[in-house]
Image: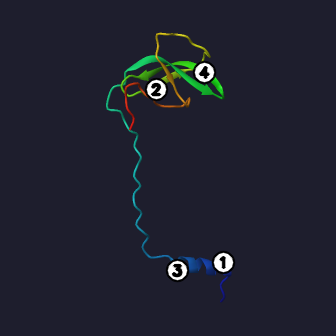
Amino acid sequence: MSISSKEFKIQRKYKELPEQPRYKKKKKKISVKRSNHKHIYNECLFSFCFFGEPYMGAGTYCTICGRIGDIDVASKVITNNDLPIFIIDDFLAKEVKLPGTSES
């Protein structure tokens, strides 16, 4: 009896496989870095470019670490001299650089 070429390839493939499969290492899970403080949010203004147009949006930021809480971009121009203004490069930024802190 002769075997077909397809059966021959299957037999050769399984003949070369070792009896015991290789040990697979467990992958490390990437965990989300959690803050070690309670966020205290203050209101502020954010200045950024969105599709080439400058926008000012009201929002909140954490006074301890600089994390951005939310940004409201409903209005194009907001004028309020009492609030601090932060310039961010990306609309989707997660943090702002606080004055008086050094980044290493």
Q: Is residue 68 left or right of residue 75?
A: left
Foreground residue, 67 or 97? 97
Q: Using the numbered discs, state the Cα–Cα distance from disc 3 to disc 1 in whole angstroms.
A: 14 Å
Residue type of the residue flagged with mark 3: Lys
CA separation, marks 2 and 4? 16 Å
Question: Under tag 2, what secondary structure?
Answer: strand
Q: Indicate which disc, 3 or 4, sits on the residue closer to the N terminus.
A: 3
Q: Position of residue 49 (x, y in %)?
A: 61, 26
Please give the label number shown on residue 55.
4
Identify residue for label 2.
Answer: 68
Disc 3 or disc 2, which is closer to the eye?
2
Q: Residue at x 48, y 31 (%)?
A: 94
**Left or right of residue 8, residue 35 in this image:** left
Q: Nearer the viewer, mark 3 or mark 4?
A: 4
Task: Write down the quadrant of residue 23 in the picture.
Answer: bottom left
Q: Earlier in the sequence, mark 1 or mark 4?
A: 1
Q: Looking at the picture, which amino acid does disc 4 mark? A: Tyr
Query: Which residue was labeled with disc 3?
Result: 15
The mark closer to the camera, 1 or 4, is 4
Q: Residue at x 35, y 33 (%)?
A: 35
What crowding class fits label 4: few (fewer than 14 Cα within 10 Å), some (14-19), or many (20 or more)? some
Q: Is residue 4 above or below residue 52?
A: below
Name the quadrant containing residue 97.
top left
Q: CA distance from mark 1 to mark 4?
A: 65 Å
Residue type, mark 1 in image? Lys
Residue tagged 1: 6
Q: Residue at x 39, y 35 (%)?
A: 103
Q: Earlier in the sequence, mark 3 or mark 1?
A: 1
